[in-house]
Image (cartoon, rainbow, N blue to C red):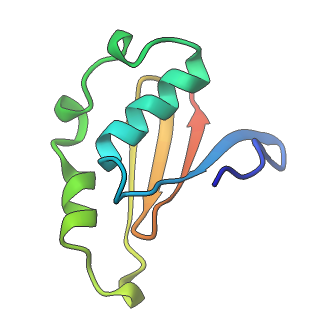
């Protein structure tokens, strides 16, 4: 489920990933491609950025009360992904 595109003064895109349907790595690349209006194949591979860290977060998640969050920069966006699948994408200069 998508949420509003803005958050206060910052332009932030929000997404809720369904990790049973696609890998989190793939979801991040597809979302950035959508935001940029390009094909996912035009973006750099995410593997070299975070080495499947997101896949590990969802395949062997910590306890819910850990409220784990992974944050990194990818293809001009500051990406934050929570262990429950909520994510945000903020364009960085």
The N terminus - image quarter = bottom right
* Residue 13 placement (x, y as % from top left): 66, 41
* Residue 73 placement (x, y as % from top left): 40, 36
Q: Nearer the viewer, residue 20 or 57?
A: 20
The reply to whether residue 72 is visible in this rendering is yes
Q: Is residue 39 above or below residue 80?
A: above
Q: Is residue 58 above or below residue 30?
A: below
Q: Nearer the viewer, residue 41 or 46?
A: 41
Q: Nearer the viewer, residue 32 or 49?
A: 32
Image-quadrant location for residue 36: top right
Q: Residue at x 37, y 57 (%)?
A: 19
Q: Is residue 26 above or below residue 67?
A: above
The C terminus - image quarter = top right
Q: Residue at x 46, y 62 (%)?
A: 85
Q: Residue at x 84, y 50 (%)?
A: 8
The reply to whether residue 93 is visible in this rendering is no
User: What is the residue that sits farthest to the right in this orientation?
Assistant: 8
Q: Is residue 5 above or below residue 54?
A: above
Image-quadrant location for residue 75: top left
* Residue 7 placement (x, y as % from top left): 78, 50
* Residue 62 placement (x, y as % from top left): 26, 80
């Amino acid at each position: 489920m998508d949420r509003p595109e803005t958050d206060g003064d910052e332009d932030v895109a929000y997404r809720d990933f369904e990790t049973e349907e696609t890998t989190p790595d793939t979801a991040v690349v597809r979302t950035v491609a959508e935001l940029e209006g390009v094909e996912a194949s035009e973006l750099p591979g995410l593997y070299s950025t975070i080495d499947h860290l997101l896949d590990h977060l969802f395949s062997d998640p910590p306890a819910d009360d850990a409220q784990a969050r992974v944050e990194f920069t990818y293809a001009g966006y500051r990406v934050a992904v929570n262990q429950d699948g909520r994510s945000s994408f903020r364009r960085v200069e």
